């Protein structure tokens, strides 16, 4: 005699919702501190690709379930493929593509950080446009402790905190607290955990109230110019300023300012 056994449906690795121009992406493997497995990376990439095509989304919040934000790569999965060079190369190629997508996405991305953000989890925070952390959050690039230098996490972190501080994190593997992360430039705000959602909402409310077209052009130009030589950076910025001033939103914004009224942005 066979017996049907009811099993609970498998929870998605990533949950996504939209509300009032805000898309919220939630990492959803809380029992393991939301590790960036190959499947998790693919799920995040799929959500980002969908958001990039959705003009109704004005800003993205990246958050996580459980006691921490993200523990980095899935070490168990990596150990299972330790001798497979092709697999390892593929993992880091897909992770790097996902990280770069955070900066090429037309919409700003805000990291909402609680608990730990370590290794590639710290990298994830660094690649977001803005970051708000609970005062109990900690950040680390601890690969050195297990014989793996955090080379890819360092790409984003070093572009936030500077060389000496990045190397301190890389060479010691020691965590830094939220206040230090704020002082070093890894996050924008540190607030009590109970105020985390309100602090993120302050940013999202402001961004949703601004011109989507201007933000899209401005974000793209910022990342194009930031690592260029000075003259080349000014070329990029000047080109973008010219393009922005040709937008209807620019004329509307200046008219609204001069007329002392609220702007009426295109598409709002």
Image (cartoon, rainbow, N blue to C red):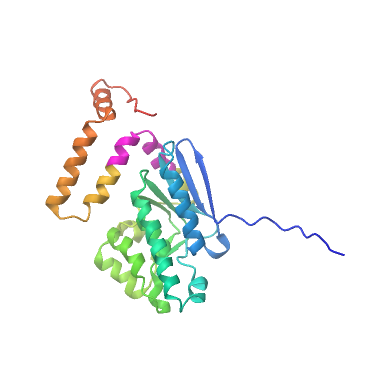
- Towards the viewer: 13 or 121: 13
* Helix, strand or loop: magenta stretch: helix
- Towards the viewer: 10 or 135: 10
Q: Position of residue 251 (x, y in %)?
A: 24, 26
Stretch in magenta: 201-217
212 lies left or right of 15: left
Q: Is residue 261 above or below residue 124?
A: above
Could one spot residue 82 in this view of the protein?
yes
- Towards the viewer: 101 or 171: 101
- Towards the viewer: 244 or 139: 244
At horizontal 31% and vertical 58% (from top left) the residue drawn is 183
Q: Residue furthest top?
A: 259
Taking the magenta stretch, the answer to whether it contains residue 205 is yes
Q: Position of residue 166 (x, y in %)?
A: 30, 67
Q: Is residue 223 above or below residue 41?
A: above
At horizontal 53% and vertical 60% (from top left) the residue drawn is 67
Q: Is residue 18 above or below residue 160?
A: above
Q: Residue furthest left?
A: 231
């Amino acid at each position: 005699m066979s017996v049907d056994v009811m099993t609970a449906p498998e929870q998605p690795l990533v949950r996504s919702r939209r509300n009032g121009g805000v898309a919220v992406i939630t990492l959803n493997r809380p029992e393991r501190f939301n590790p960036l497995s190959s499947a998790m990376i693919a799920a995040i990439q799929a959500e980002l690709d969908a958001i990039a095509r959705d003009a109704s989304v004005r800003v993205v919040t990246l958050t996580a379930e459980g006691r921490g934000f993200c523990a980095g790569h899935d070490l168990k999965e990596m150990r299972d493929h330790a001798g497979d060079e092709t697999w390892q190369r593929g993992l880091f190629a897909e992770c790097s593509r996902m990280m770069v997508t955070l900066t090429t996405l037309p919409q700003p991305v805000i990291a909402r950080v609680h608990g730990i953000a370590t290794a590639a989890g710290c990298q994830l925070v660094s690649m977001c446009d803005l970051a708000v952390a609970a005062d109990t959050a900690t950040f680390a690039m601890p690969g050195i402790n297990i014989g793996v230098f955090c080379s890819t996490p360092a790409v984003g972190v070093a572009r936030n905190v500077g060389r000496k501080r990045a190397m301190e994190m890389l060479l010691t593997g020691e965590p830094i607290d939220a206040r230090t992360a704020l002082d070093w430039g890894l996050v924008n705000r540190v607030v009590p955990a109970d105020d985390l959602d309100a602090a993120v909402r302050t940013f999202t409310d402001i961004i949703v109230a601004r011109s989507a077209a201007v933000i899209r052009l401005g974000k793209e130009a910022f990342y194009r110019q930031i690592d260029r030589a000075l003259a080349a950076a000014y070329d990029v910025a000047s080109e973008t300023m010219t393009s922005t001033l040709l937008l209807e939103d620019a004329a509307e914004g200046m008219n609204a300012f001069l007329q002392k009224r609220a702007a009426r942005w295109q598409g709002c």
